[in-house]
Image (tube, grey):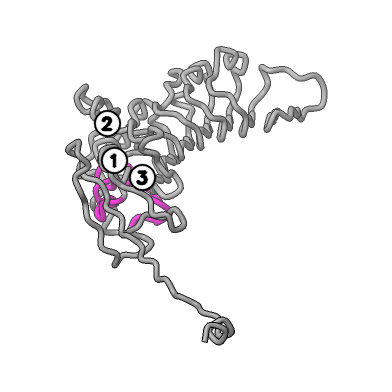
């Protein structure tokens, strides 16, 4: 049985009477859900759940699903991986969680039957943040591009060394590129299967990174770039806009001399360049003749 609820348009595909207990696939994408509740317990046989683009901030109620095998949480506002029921941790095969605000993946080690994991475009910044993948012996597809950790040119080798040693026995595609023979030799060199759980100090450090996603320092998930303010508030007060096109003077004319002068309260202020006006006298020849 299949149920689709997208953009508040409700459609049910089934011949005969609808029964929630028989529902196996639900698409709830592109709705404003923000959070879930215990009503998910009415779906004991749900296998596939699509919650993408729902503005979710809390997905803890997913623990009410006992048999989900494919879970799509992409394009939401989640900071924590949801905890699943004990049975769902064994049944989950595909987890799609790209474009969220994950700075760590605590709890992933319990989902040790995952074969496909998509963590692209989050805020994973330290290789230690990905140590729980060492507890996933069946991983076949791993995607982490778009995270700050990938700015390191050696990130691919570092992550491959954290994979579970058992993954060397089957084909693995990492960020859309299959592992090479040399990379298979590196698999599991630094794996920490039991290191699935972070120390309190590391967890606190990783969690603090999610503060980068505030409106002051927004994250651009599409490119994995962090936009930092160019000036401090104090410096911003010292910058005056040039009247020409409301552009900073340094952008209008880089060669224009700029000097700073004390304003009297101890703060420097910009001394604008004075404009010179040239006056031209125009005489009427006829008037000159009359004078003569």
Please report whichever mark, 3 or 2, sits nearer to the chain's N-terminal start.
Answer: 2
Task: Report x, y in % for residue 252.
Answer: 38, 62
Task: Report x, y in % for residue 278.
Answer: 40, 71
Position of residue 278 in the picture relative to residue 69 (left or right): left
Residues tagged 1 and 2 counted as in contact (Cβ below 8 A): yes
Give the residue displayed 32% in from the left and 60% down from the top: 274
Give the residue displayed 53% in from the left and 34% down from the top: 72
Which numbered marker is on residue 227?
A: 3
Q: Residues within 10 Å of mark 2 (few under 14, many from 20)?
A: many
**Closer to the camera: disc 3 or disc 2?**
3
Between 185 and 231, the one lying in front of the other is: 231
Q: Quadrant of residue 286?
A: bottom right
Between 39 and 7, the one lying in front of the other is: 7
Going by the picture, which residue comes out furthest to the front? 292
The residue stretch that appears in magenta: 151-179
Which numbered marker is on residue 88?
A: none
Residue ID for mark 2: 206
Q: CA distance from mark 3 to mark 2?
A: 19 Å
Residues tagged 1 and 3 counted as in contact (Cβ below 8 A): no
Residue ID for mark 1: 125
Please report whichever mark, 1 or 3, sits nearer to the chain's N-terminal start.
Answer: 1
Q: Quadrant of residue 208?
A: top left
Secondary structure under the numbered disc 2 in the rendered image: helix
Going by the picture, which residue comes out furthest to the left? 266
Between 234 and 205, the one lying in front of the other is: 234
Task: Report x, y in % for residue 97.
Answer: 46, 36
């Amino acid at each position: 049985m299949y149920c689709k609820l997208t953009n508040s348009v409700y459609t049910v595909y089934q011949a005969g009477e609808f029964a929630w207990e028989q529902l196996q696939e639900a698409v709830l994408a592109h709705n404003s859900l923000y959070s879930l509740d215990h009503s998910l317990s009415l779906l004991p046989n749900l296998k596939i759940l699509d919650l993408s683009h729902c503005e979710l901030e809390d997905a803890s109620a997913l623990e009410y699903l006992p048999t989900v095998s494919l879970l799509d949480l992409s394009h939401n506002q989640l900071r924590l991986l949801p905890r699943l029921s004990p049975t769902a941790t064994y049944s989950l095969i595909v987890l799609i969680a790209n474009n969220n605000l994950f700075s760590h993946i605590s709890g992933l080690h319990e989902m040790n039957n995952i074969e496909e994991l998509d963590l692209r475009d989050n805020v994973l910044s330290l290789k230690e943040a990905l140590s729980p993948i060492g507890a996933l012996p069946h991983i076949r597809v791993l995607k982490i591009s778009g995270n700050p950790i990938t700015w390191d040119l050696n990130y691919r080798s570092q992550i491959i060394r954290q994979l579970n040693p058992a993954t060397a026995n089957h084909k693995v595609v990492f960020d859309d590129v299959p592992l090479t023979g040399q990379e298979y030799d590196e698999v599991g060199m630094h794996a920490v299967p039991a290191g699935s759980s972070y120390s309190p100090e590391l967890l606190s450090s990783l969690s603090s990174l999610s503060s980068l996603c505030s409106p002051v320092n927004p994250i651009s998930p599409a490119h994995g770039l962090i936009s930092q303010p160019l000036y401090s508030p104090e410096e911003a007060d010292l910058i005056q806009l040039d009247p020409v096109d409301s552009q900073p003077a340094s952008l209008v004319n880089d060669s224009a001399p700029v000097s700073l002068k004390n304003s009297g309260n101890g703060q420097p202020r910009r001394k604008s360049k004075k404009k010179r006006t040239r006056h031209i006298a125009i005489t009427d020849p006829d008037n000159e003749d009359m004078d003569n």
